[in-house]
Every structure is written in structure tokens, then in C-alpha cells.
Image: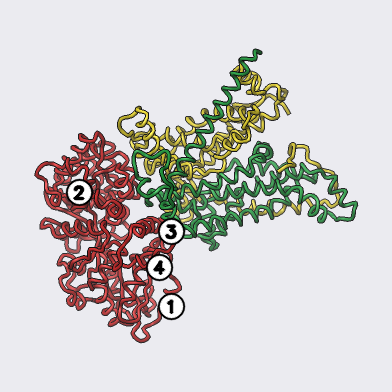
Chain colours: A green, B red, C yellow
Amino acid sequence: MALRQIRIGRVLAYVAALVLSAFILAPIYLITISAFSGFDAVYDYPKNLVPSDLTMESMNIFLDSEGVTDSLLRSVYVAAITIIVCLAIGTPAGYALARFTFRGANPFQLALVSTRAFPLIIIAIPLAVTYLRVGIDDTVLGVALAHVAFTLPLTVLVTASVFAGISYELEEAAMTLGCNRLSAFRRVALPLALPGVAASSIFVFVTSWNEVFAAALLTLRERTLPAQMLAALDTSPLPYRLAGGFFLLAPALVVIFFIRKYLLTTWGKVAR
Amino acid sequence: MGDVNEPGFGWDEPLDRRTLLERAAIAGGALAAGGLLTASQASAGSSAVGGKVTAFFGQFGGIAEQEGIRKYVLRSFNGEVDGIFAPISNPALFVDRVRAEAKAGKGNIDLLIGLHGDFVTFQNEGLIRGVGDIAKQAKNLPEALLRSGKLGTKTQYYVPHSTATYVMVANKDVLKYMPKGADINALTYGQVFAWAKAIRKGTGQNRFGLPASDTGLFHRFLQGFLVPSFTGGFVTAFRSKEAVAAWEYMRQLWQYTHPQSLSYAFMQDPLLSEEVLLGWDHVARLKTALDQRPDDLVAFPVPKGPKARAYMPVIVGLGIPKNAPNPDGARALARHMLTLSAQAQILSITGFFPTVPGRLSKKISPGLLAESNAVRRQLQAKDAVPAQLPIGIGAEGGNFSKIYRDTFTRIVRNNENIQTVLKEQGDLLQAIFDKTGAPCWGPDPSSGKAPCRVK
Amino acid sequence: MTTIAEDTAPLARRRRRWEGLPYLLILPTVVYLGVFFVWPMIQGFGLALRDESGGWSLSAFETMVDDAAFGDAMSFTFLLILVIVPIQLVLALGMALLLNARLRLGGLFLYIFLLPLAISDLAAGIAWSAIFTERGYLNTILEGVGVLEQPFIFLDPTSRTQLVIAVAAAEIWRSTTFMMVILFAGLQAIPKDYTEAAEVFGAGFFQRVRHVIFPMLKPSIQVALLLRLIFAFEVFAVVIALTGSGATVLAAEAYKWQATNENEHVAAAYSMVILGLSLAAAAVVLVALRTPRERRLR
């Protein structure tokens, strides 16, 4: 193959990568400058593609609006409860899949994978009915429990993959040095697995933070941020919507930075 | 945070732009979020110890509105008063609770602040007493509103306290397209059409807009403005040839209407972005735009049709439950709420206009001032005819509105034959009145006690 | 984030001390999913197949089918899938190949390409409505460069084509990454010499993709398509954010019947339709991209 062609190929690759990056970044950039522009600028036309001055006016309108700070906090609570329950229940199961041969392991794993074929819509509607009966409708806990149901299978699969990547010899060595199974797990396997488990928690956080359908159906007043935004879409002024959209999107910028490598390796494989 | 704690919130204080912005946002957020039930206060509403008055609000349940009313309107009352608010998210609670207290035989509530429709229910179920004495003491309340408060009887069941309605707003840039010789404060439907058409010609785009999304109040335009202005009635003339003309008009007007009208819920947003330069909506849904751009926007009364300048009023009234523990206190509080200063505070806090005549201070926000002038002109126009929603259709209210929406979709969007559609939709309309037995209501001619009939 | 499993398949299963332990460890997960996943699903069937009075009936399905919005929602959902999925597959494959090409600044591209994975369809809808709205960024740009003289109404509720294009743009933007991640994982299982960037983007690139990469990636493509189709039936907030009440999809109708009309039976009927379609789509993908056993890679 000619060297020139190779060079052209590389140039084309860079051009393609840059165009795709621009396509992905443009909406993020535009909503960010909209969220940090003044009331008048938001309604201005033609729009300023490069903001002349950034202000907190729109942001303040949003944050000062009734129910917004509460819904932000609720979103955080829901995500936190979801992560805790997911880890408490999912980590042991993941460990079991990675370390033990037992009858039912394969069907169990298959069942976890196949939960993905069932859209969450299907369970959100009956849950709304059940919650009313049980009395946890319109609560942070109720939303979190539903989010656990969507995120638990993936958490188990990911933690299984994380533990499988940690050599069992280390745990065995610890056990010969006097640890029992539990303390060997706690002192050896868990610390090694922590980065992977943390990454999976971050993914659970994002899933919960972004989830609209169940959150909107299961709450009325105790809305999470996405549910609040959905309800306010056509009744709130434009600056409110833009600032809210920015808040919904902002965590992605941080979260992806921390889990980008992990997403490509473990998550890509597990999803497969 | 919490602009209600800032001194700028009071109506007596000058309103700065930031406060206005925040309040606009609060109104938006509040509509979406729904208010919180002030349950603690509700249960604490003690039973008539001393001179304490318990006021129950079926309106103004938003957090900022509650705060404002407690802090200014109630605090300035010379006596002990407790304010309870039904949550926005569940307005039915207002009626439910009054009903529950009546059933329990032990009342806590002294004064009711609710919508015309709420009082209809109260009166039907015999839950309220007459308040003619308060009405007599309050001077110069508009006769039409007082009549509404009698609910078709001889007794005054509520005193009209504040009111809202729907008006039109135009961007001053398009005033030049207004038909020659037209008076902006006395437009006709024909002139509005000519105007919308001229705007299209002048700007190249359809810039007339209506709030026709699912959550918009477009059905009110059809029910309470367009059809009664053409037919002079609400229900009886639904299939008349005048109604055919009204729908033909709508079909024509739609050709010059911004297509995104189908996704507008609050017209203030497209008016601010200048997507729409001429529009119609509820005053509360226009206020932010008029506050933000007082120099660019103008508010004016709705147009007049062949039969009338029909408009749909929204009336908030004051009433007293039969088993109120402290009716004298309630009367005193009602009198207080009908003072000009309390009325102005209500206007500033909620955007609902006073029923008591009097000059409004210049300190009022520009948007409210513009709106209140338009509303007054609309109320005072000689040809103005209030078209209230029919009374007694109860839970069928949603279907009643759906009929108008569907009629619009079939005639205007699907281009079906007008007579055929009106015939079929008229049958559905009749079914509602047959089912509920609701009689005709103004501007339709009275049908006595018999259910209203679509002719 | 350093130690990461090479693969989940060869699980280290050695010690057998106490037979019951693994069962004890998976018990909470099994119970939880039983209560919060399987049981609600069974309930969902019950809701869809009963009427208000509690008796078995098909009235919920009848109401659903008779509703004018049903046909609209169904056709819009399928239109979206038809427009989005092919474009996404090509884009996702291209992005995965680019990431695999070891470009300079590869880490930065990786970060950028992954961003949409953590963005909700609601946020995507809000961001893209700022672009597509009549007084928005797209018209600003098009007018600025002289393509348009007047702002164009992209989000015209009376034009189905325009609404499909707008929603498709937002969805392609948001959910292509998700397919890319799966394809990238598959790509890494292919020996390096096939996928070296220079060669790949040089002469014979498309032949290479067609004859070498595509067949080897088939299992990954299968999974990516499968999950993408399943998720496609769940999308609703982006449609609401972009079109208002101009267009509707199945999930949006399910939401409306539950939240606005407070009729959980019809809502459940919608969810059953969505379930049926998801499973049908999965079956189609599995059959269409079937790999004969002897040609499987692993």
C-alpha cells in the first residue's frame, strides 16, 4: 500500500473525527451559552453564537423558581438510594457469579441479560398502581426502588466481570494467611474491585439522574428534576427551560470523564 | 432565593426588573410543580376561639402567592386570621374539604375564596349562606359581576372579589398593518382577520398566534369568544348558520395563523421571541411578556362579532359556609379584602384584577397596568357580553371543552364539511346536557329547569 | 479503573466449600427482581386485560385502538426507527473505527464521543429545540450564511416529515454513542492488523469494512441493533420536548393515559404493545443476522 494513500487516510480520519466531535459538542455548547445568557438575549433573534457577556440571570430564574432546588435535591437522593441498594444487593450476586460454579449460574446470568429486552415502561405503570396501594406513591423512595429494578441487572453483570478480573489466588493466599472467606473478600478482593465498582456506581447515578418516564409517573409533587422539567416544558418561560436543560445535561460532562475508559472495556463487553 | 422575603415584593414598594423576572419564573414553575398543601396549618385551624378568622383559598395556592397573601393581605387585617390554601395540583380539594366539614357537622372555615364554578357547587349542595350584606356595604361593584354572584337566584351567594379574563396582545411593530380606520380598542373579528392577513403580507410570515397546544387555552377562545360572538349563544346556537359562519371564519383565519400555534401553551413566550406578533390568551399567561417588553407590546380588548363582543370572565368570589364558626369575623375579613389597598395587593401578587373601582397606583408593574387597562376596556365596552361556562355539567367539563377542540380539528385541520361536523358534534354536546340535566346559561336564553337543548 | 476483566466468559469457579453460599449471595437479587421486575410485569398483563370493574376484557385494547392518537403514535414510532437506525449504525461503526485507529488526541475524541451516553432524551430534546425552534440557532446560522432569507419553521406541527427529521437528528445525536460502545468492544476482539487506521482509511477501506470487519463484527452489530431497537420504543421525552403536541409516539401515549387520563388499563395496554414490538424486533434482528455456527468467532 502506497505511503501517500496512508497519509490521505489519516487526514480523512482526523477530519471525520473533528466533524463528529463538532456535531456532538455543538448542542452542548449552545445550551450552555443559552443557560448563561440574560433574559433578553434568550429571546433575541438572530441568536448570538458567541455570547457577548455571560450572566446568571436565566440560571437565577430557574434556581429561584418554586420547587426547583427541591427537585434537584430529590434527584440526588434518588440516585444515592439507588446506588446504595444496587451495590448492597448486586455486589454479592456479582461476586457469586465470578467465583462459584453452581447450578443455575448460567440461567441466572441469562435472565439478567434478558431483562434488557423489557422496556422499563412495562413495569413503571403497574408499579404506579401498586405504590398507590402500598402508600409509597409520590415518594423519593418509590422512585429509587424502581430505578434499582432497572439498574440492578447491569450492576450484577458488571461487578461479576470486575471480580472475574481479579485473580482468585490473591484471596486464596489471604485465606492461607488466616483470613476467612469474608475477611479475604473484604481485605483483598473488595479494594481491588473498588475502582470498577465505583465506575459502575457512577453509571447507575447517571441512569437514575436521567430517568424521566418512571420518575414522572410515580410522583406528583415530589418530583425529581427530569420529572419537574417534563411537567414544566410547555408552561415555563424559555430561560427556565434552557437553564433546566443545562442542569440535566451537565453531570454528563463530569461523569464521562471519570468512567470513559471503563465504559469502553467492561461495559461494552457486558452489554454484549 | 425566596424573593418573597425581599422588600421589593410588596405592592407598595417599587418593583424592580429582577423581582418581576423571578416572579414570572415562579408562576411558570408553580403551574408545573403544583403547590404544597399547607397541611399543618390546615389542621391547626382552630375552632372559633376568640375572634380568630379562618380563610380557605381555593385559588392562589402557589408558594409565592401564598406567601404574598399571608404577608401583605392577611397581615394588614385588623384581627387574628389564619390562611389555608388548596394546592394547585389538586384544586378539587377545595370543594372536597368544605363538603367534608359540612358532613362532619363541625366547621372550621369562616371565609371561602374560590372560583365562580366552586360556588355553583356549594350552592347546589346547600353548603353556603347568603352574603348580601357584604355586597351592599362594598360600593360600586360591577352590576354584571354581582349578578353572577347570585348564581341565578335572588340571594347573593358570593361577593365578586377579583377577576381575570383573556385579552389580545400585539407587537407595536405590526400596528402599522392594522386595517385603516380600525380602533384597536373596538376591533371586529373581520378587522382581526384583515390584520393577520396584512401581517403575513408585510412580514412574509404568519405571525398571528393562538395557544392551541394540548395544555393551551385555545378551547376557551372557541367556546367563550369566537362562537358566542358570532351566534350570541353558547350551546343553543351550536348548529346555527351563524355558527357555520364562525367556523368558516376560523378556517380562514387559520391560514394566517402561525403553524406552531399547535404547540403553544402560554403565548408570552412566542410574543417575547417575536415568533408571534399578534395573539390572544389568558392575562396570567401574557403577563411576563408585558412586564418584560412594556414598550414593545400593547394589550387590548377582544374583537366583536356579528352578535356580540363575547368574552369569558374568570371570577373569584368571597362566600361564607353555612357552618362557619365565626361568620362575623368572616364578614370583617371580606370587607378588608374588598378595600382598594388589599385589592391592589392581590393584583400585584396574583395578577387577578380588582372588582372594586379606583385608580391603580403608578407603581404597579407595567405589564399589569397594560393588562388592567385592556381588561377594563373590555369589561366596560357597551357591547361586551360575558360568556360563562355552563353550570351544572360537573365532571363533563372536560368533555365539553373536547367537543370544541374536536370540532376545530375536524373543520379546520381536516377540512371536513362544516354542517356535518356541527351536526355530529352537536349530538355529543346534547348528550352532555341530557346526561347532567344542566339548564341553559347566559348568554343562551334560559331553559328554566329543563336541560339545555342544542337547536 | 485499572484492573478490568479481560472477559466475563471464563469465570474462575474453583472452590466448593459450602454449596449454599452462592445461592445465598444471589438470593437478594433474585428476590428483588422478582418483586420489582417480574411481578409488575405480570401485573401489567393483568391491568391491560381487565377493565375498570375488574373483570377480564379487551376493552383497554379497544379503547387504545379506537383512539385517534394510536395510529399516529404507531406510525411515528416506526418512521423514527426507519430513519434513525440505519444512519446510526453507519455512524456508530465509523466512530468505533475512528476510536480504534489510535489517532493523536484519541483520548479527547473518546471523551467527546462518549458524552451523549450520559445525556437523557429530555435534555437532548431541550437542547435541540433551542436549535430547531423558529427563532433558534439553526435559522440564525442559515440566515447568516445566506441560505435563508426568512427564518424557516422547522418544528411545524403540520409537517410530519419535518418533525421526523428534527426528532431523528436529536436521537441520532444522543443515542449513537450507545451503539458505538458495543461495536467498539467487538472491534477490539478483531486482530489489530485488520483495523489499523492508516490502512483502514487508505485505499480499499470500504472493501475491508465490507469483507473483513463487517462479518467479524456481526455478533456485536446484532447486539447493538437489538438493544437499540428495544430502546427506540421507549423514547418519548425528546418527542414531547421537540414537537409539543405536534407528534406522538407509543411511549408518550402510555404516559398520557397513565398520568393525564388516569386510565392505567389503557396505559398498560400500550405498554404491552411496546413489549410485543420490542420482542418482535429482537426476533427479527436475531434471525436476520444469524451467524452459522461453524463461522462463529468465539
Residue shown at 77% from the left, 42% from the top: A164
Q: Tell me which corner region of the image, top left, top right, bottom left or bottom right, holds residue C220.
A: top right
**Kind of residue at disc 3:** Asp
Question: Is disc 1 on the same chain as disc 2?
Answer: yes
Q: Nearer the viewer, mark 4 or mark 1?
A: 4
Q: Is residue B201 left or right of residue B100?
A: left
Question: Is disc 1 on the same chain as disc 4?
Answer: yes
Foreground: A205 or C157?
Answer: A205
Q: Which residue is mark 4?
A: B5
Residue shown at 77% from the left, 41% from the top: A165
| Residue B337 placement (x, y as % from top left) | 26, 73
Q: Nearer the viewer, mark 3 or mark 2?
A: 3
| Residue A129 placement (x, y as % from top left) | 51, 56
Q: On the rendered image, what quadrant is the N terminus of chain B found in?
A: bottom left
- Name the chain letter of the residue that bears numbered label 1: B
Going by the picture, which residue comes out furthest to the bottom?
Answer: B50
Q: Which residue is mark 1?
A: B44
Q: Is residue B435 left or right of residue A193?
A: left
Query: Tag 1 or tag 2, which sits nearer the N-term?
Result: 1
**Residue C280 visible in this rendered orientation of the protein:** no
Q: Which residue is mark 2?
A: B226
- Name the chain letter of the residue that bears numbered label 3: A
Q: Cα distance, mark 2 to mark 1?
A: 47 Å
Query: Tag 2 or tag 4, which sits nearer the N-term?
Result: 4
Q: Which residue is mark 3?
A: A64
Q: Nearer the viewer, mark 3 or mark 1?
A: 3
Foreground: A139 or A46?
Answer: A46
Q: Nearer the viewer, mark 2 or mark 1?
A: 1
**Residue A254 visible in this rendered orientation of the protein:** yes
C-beta proximity under 8 Å, tags 4 and 2: no
